[in-house]
Amino acid sequence: MKTFCGRANPTTGSMEWLEEGEDYDYHQEIARSRYADMLHDKDRNVKYYQGIRAAVSRVKERGEKAIVLDIGTGTGLLSMMAASAGADFCYAIEVFKPMANAAVKIVEKNGFSEKIKVINKHSTEVTVGPDGDMQCRANILVTELFDTELIGEGALPSYEHAHKYLVQEGCEAVPHRARVYVQLVESRRMWSWKKLFPIHVEVEDGEKILVPPSEMENCPGVPSVCDIQLNQMPSSDFSILSDVVTMFSVDFSKPVQSASTYYRVQLEPVKSGKAQIVLSWWDIDMDPSGMINCTMAPYWVKPTSALQWRDHWMQCVYFLPREEPVLQGEKLSLTACRDEYSVWYNLQKAREGENKADEEEHKADVGVESPVCRCRAHLLWNRPRFGELNDQNRTHQYIKSLRKVLKTDSVCLCISDGSLLPVLAHYLGAKQVQCMQPSRIDLYHPPNHLEDKIKIIEARPELLKPSHLEDKKISVLVGEPFFTTSLLPWHNLYFWYARTAVSTHLASNVTVLPRSASLHMMIVEFQDLWRIRSPCGICEGFDVQTMDDMIKDSLNFRESREAEPHPLWEYPCKSLSDPREVLTFDFTKTVPEHCLSTEGSVKLLRKGKSHGAVLWMEYHLAADISVSTGLMQLSNEKGNCEWNPHCKQAVYFFSSVIESEILSDPTAVTYVINFDTKTGEIAMDFKL
């Protein structure tokens, strides 16, 4: 059966109806899943296996049959571990139907069909009894329901239900317990992801300061966790204000409560500073003694141990509601509030001699209510976008370019989402400033008195009328360009389509900024990111190739494989080729009718595995002034790369991973790249 799916095309801006097969959503889910990453997580797999063997042994030593309940079985891996460790029977629960079907095949292929029953249901719908899904309650509970925040995938309600209805009292649990750790830090870089800093603009009569309005200044932001690869954050980008402390722990072998609650710990800063950020991660003990431990601790906490790279579990950055100045040695009280799925934090000065009764009294001012964005900016801008708007170097490039093109009689139109450009254009002397799709520019009106200086046009580019512009022609058209609907770097070419749509309103000598854009490409070897797309084959002695095939089918579900967005500052890679400009887009002209295409061959200069190509855009603002959304610099002859930290780059993984030859005779990668101007889509193909 085919279904029609409506979507707004991020590049052309037009509404499209696409005919999709009924498997489309499932293929998207599988293709972009983290199953491969989990199967490659050696540390996780080995420790789960050790924990499961130990739990089965403890049950057998008591003279009982080992009956296992595995919630969220995925490939069936943990159930197969239990069966091979001597469990008498396993109930493997998987709610996602394609995954449950794969688990049945994998279990059968590995010869465990007699001992493992795959149940395609949500665990809360599973029944127990002679006619039920399970004959009896289990005495070993095995799960892997965790995300970076530990509880974000609904682990707590699932455990709560399982203890009530599906497992015996006093059951063994793998993992046995989890602990959540926190550390207080000051970090201008991370804080810039939550709030807008004042912007200084030098103008003819001195300096103007653009100030964010108070409702934004005091806004607690949104509760969703910011999960990142903290191991890629250099120690120079944050200052540690407290020791690491255990915030709370959960014992999975006993009944679990999922109801909203809070936890409080006392902290003494090891250094004075501005408390802005709570960094957090967790570990799990696979056994009651804590001998089998799997930790997400970042590099500075366990500097001696080798770090296991993983992308399915990272570390959390939480933003305090406001910046709190703290003094070394003063007592502080940090509160973690949580509901079933998320955690948020509050910091207060500890009250002297506080006892339990006082604590109950102060429960009210903890606020177990989840933070809600009141200024709307946090709903519109994601965290990297805040970082981008706070990037002074980047803003300076735009100011420098605007200075070159603006005159006192300039009529300026800005097309970009939630941009500072209209305000900058006004400060730099444009006679008239208008903006389309302004998203949040009104944020700047109250404190900056710009209500009547910048006109907001509530219309799409193709519906622009002369009356919107007071019958004037646009002499300067500007864009960053940035649009909230963009996922891949070239989606911001929407600016070109918008520019084409308003072309009748442009003066004959119009200046367009940026004047053009170019698509760049480089062949790279990833340190670790390749694992998320790499087949696993055999995992801890079990054949999981069925899963590999399923992922491969889903990745190839579209006739041409697609590039995918990744923030490469979090995923180190080395360049194997020089960066190359492959396509250019001239914004001074309208979008052409014909496709833009290029083909060529790029030499591999360094030895290494060619995992894929990275693609990014560069915008040419004015003579000699460009901004890159990708490569910032190639640092050395080793080919280490520094990427724009505010943008996701496009990664196209090659189907095969080849070893490039020795330098005297470097191999090459040939490419064909095609930009379809009708659909705004870029198709690419690479041959090694």
Image: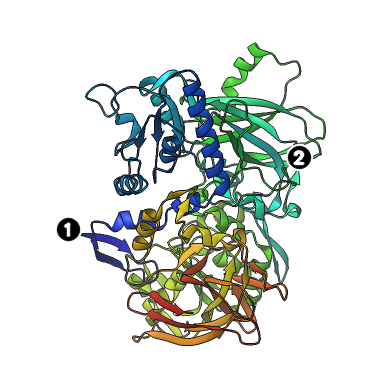
> Residue 211, how many percent across, how many down?
64, 54
Tag 1, which secondary structure? loop
Question: What number is the disc on residue 105?
Answer: none
Residue at image location 60% in from the left, 52% down from the top: 309
> Residue 370, how many percent across, how many down?
51, 34
Residue ID for mark 2: 241
Residue at image location 51% in from the left, 64% down from the top: 454
Callout 2 crowding tier (Cα within 10 Å): few <14, some 14–19, many ≥20: many
Q: CA distance from mark 2 to mark 1?
A: 58 Å
Q: Is residue 206 left or right of residue 60?
A: right
> Residue 297, how many percent across, how many down?
65, 42
Name the residue nearer the viewer: 80 or 631. 80
Above or below, comparing residue 475 to residue 86 in the picture: below
Residue at image location 54% in from the left, 28% down from the top: 176
Residue ID for mark 1: 1
Callout 1 crowding tier (Cα within 10 Å): few <14, some 14–19, many ≥20: few
